[in-house]
Amino acid sequence: MKAALAQLARVMLGLALLIAAWPSVAAAQQAVSATVTRVVDGDTVIARGVDGTESPVRLIGIDTPESVRPGTAVECGARAAAQTLRELVEGKAVTLTSDPTQDRVDAFGRLLAYVDVGATDAGEAMIRAGYSRVYVFESRPFQRIAAYRQAEQAAKSQDAGVWRDCAGNFHSAEEPVKDAETERTEAAEAFVRRYYSRVSRRQFGLAWSMLSASQKRRFGRYSGWRAGYRRSLGTRVNQAAAELLGARAVVRVAIRSRDRDACSGREVRQFFRVRWVLSRTRGQWVATWINARKVGGGRVRVSRSQCPRPKPKPKPQAPSGGGGGGGGGGGCHPSYSPCVPTGRDYDCGELGGPYTVTGPDEYRLDGDNDGVGCE
């Protein structure tokens, strides 16, 4: 008990010494040198000042999954967040920088500061890695918020960290620990689902990066592969099942695609069965073989060149041999000259004119009965 009290006293003394040199709210920004001796969790470290005293420091502007808060279950991504910050700052010389827009200490007595390792802002790096999100205390924007917002958007678009593993929920309870085989199987299935999600969101560069070099060669050039999705309205995975075969994984999926037909403009649904073969590269899955088989749905024409051409309307043709009026031979109507072919009714818009009418005006070309039609 006495040892614990003595340790607490040393921590409080160290905090007091650092706070004594720290500016109050609205004062000018101030920076002090320190060394991070220990990482507590994803947003809190223990820093030792130049005088040898140690104090807890809470990073400004970030929020990470909890792993050490009393009464709170370990949250999804908390251990990875703590490890990421540990790799960034633990045992390293840092600069602690205050922010005049924020308090000196938080409700738990922790010093509030940005933690910079050389030119790297540890808080921004945590957000960019996907293990922290932007946190604004009491609606008081901090000085570096623009860069932090940009880093958060980049992490979301790349499905990094918690955005990938926990659907962006930074405070969901961590799932029970699974055995290695189950984790690998679920990771393989999630890999394939993520591919179709990226294609549906038109994140083609990220989807292309999930393919092995051999599979890319089978698809051909990136531009051609991407062009194959230009009519796509999205793909949904209806079923997925993965199994491990040694170091590889085989994932079988049933998908439904929606595409816009190039000729009719209508939405067409197609159904496929796809077999994926995955291998491990640098600890990550990569697709080495993809085989798709269509099992239902309509036909999609992806180019206007595939559309049927309209048939031209037939035009009346004078028979060879011509012939004037009166004779009526060779398929010409005997009442008209020059030749008007027999076989169907005509109007002057089709024929032109004029025509000499010398008999019954069967086609009603001579409206004023003066012997000349289509004048």
Image (tube, helix red, strand yellow):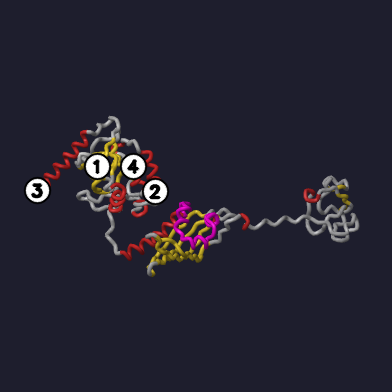
* Rendering coords of residue 119 (x, y %): 35, 41
Residue at image point 23% right, 37% down: 105
Query: At numbered mark 2, what does the secondary structure look like: helix, strand or loop?
Result: helix
Residue at the disc numbered 1: 57
Residue of label 4: 118
Which residue ends up furthest to the bottom in the rendered image? 245
Percent from the top left, x then y, of residue 328? Answer: 88, 58
**Horizontal side, residue 168 vs residue 196: left or right:** left
Residue 165 lies in magenta, yes or no? no
Q: Marks 3 and 4: which is nearer the front?
A: 4
Q: Which residue is mark 3?
A: 1
Which badge, 2 or 3, is on the more N-terminal residue? 3
Amino acid type shown at disc 1? Val
Kindly report the distance in space between the C-alpha atoms of the residues bearing marks 2 and 3.
46 Å
> Residue 233, which numbered label?
none
SS at circle 3? loop
Q: Secondary structure at mark 4?
A: loop
- The main secondary structure of the magenta stretch is helix
Distance from disc 3 to disc 4, alpha carbons, whole Å, reads 40 Å
Residue 331: x %, y % from top left? 84, 60
Measure how far apart labels 4 and 1 are at the Cα level: 18 Å
> At label 3, which amino acid type do we have?
Met
In the picture as drawn, the residue positioned furthest to the top comes out as 27
Q: Which residues are magenta?
A: 199-226
- Please name the amino acid that badge 4 sits on: Gly
205 or 87: nearer the eye? 87
* Mark closest to the chain's N terminus, 3 or 4: 3
On residue 156, which mark appears?
2
Mark nearest the camera among 2 and 3 is 3
